[in-house]
Amino acid sequence: MTLTITVALLAAVCFGWRPCCSTTARCGPARRSPLHPGLMVELARKRIWLIGVGSQVAGVALHLLAVNLGPLSWCSRCSRSGWWSRWCCSGWPGAR
């Protein structure tokens, strides 16, 4: 039970890091349309954006592990609460 909650909380932290990394990475490039073809290339060259993508992938993997270890009701409460994102982003450079 404690392992399930711990893994779900780690997944929540990973989910919280992703918006912070994405926001920080988007602050750097010149203002472009979201559909501009060069925007993805420019973001993919930024290490912080790649860390955000990796954090999202790790969050999904940890969430799947937590669901396999325990009931979904415990995992969903831990991983999908919105305060994790606000907690991870507070004090982050580029956070609004």
Image (cartoon, grey):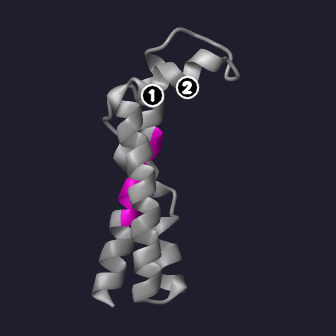
Which element is circle 1 on? helix
Q: Look at mark 2 in the image and give the residue it sits on.
A: 40
- For the point 41% across and 33% down, which residue is it? 49
36 lies left or right of 18: right
Residue range corresponding to the magenta coloring: 11-19
Q: Are marks 2 and 1 in contact (CB under 8 Å)?
A: yes
In whole angstroms, how far apart are the C-alphas of marks 2 and 1? 6 Å
Which element is circle 2 on? helix
Q: Is residue 60 above or below residue 8?
A: above
For residue 89, what is the image quadrant?
top left
Q: Position of residue 23 (x, y in %)?
A: 47, 30
- For the point 47% across and 24% down, which residue is it? 43
Q: Position of residue 12 (x, y in %)?
A: 41, 62
Q: Is residue 23 above or below residue 60?
A: above
Three-letter amino acid code of the residue under disc 1: Ala
Q: Look at mark 1 in the image and give the residue it sits on.
A: 44
Q: Nearer the viewer, residue 19 or 37?
A: 37
Magenta-colored segment: predominant secondary structure: helix
Dot 1 alpha-carbon crowd within 10 angstroms: few under 14, some 14 to 19, many 20 or more: some
Q: Is residue 14 magenta?
A: yes
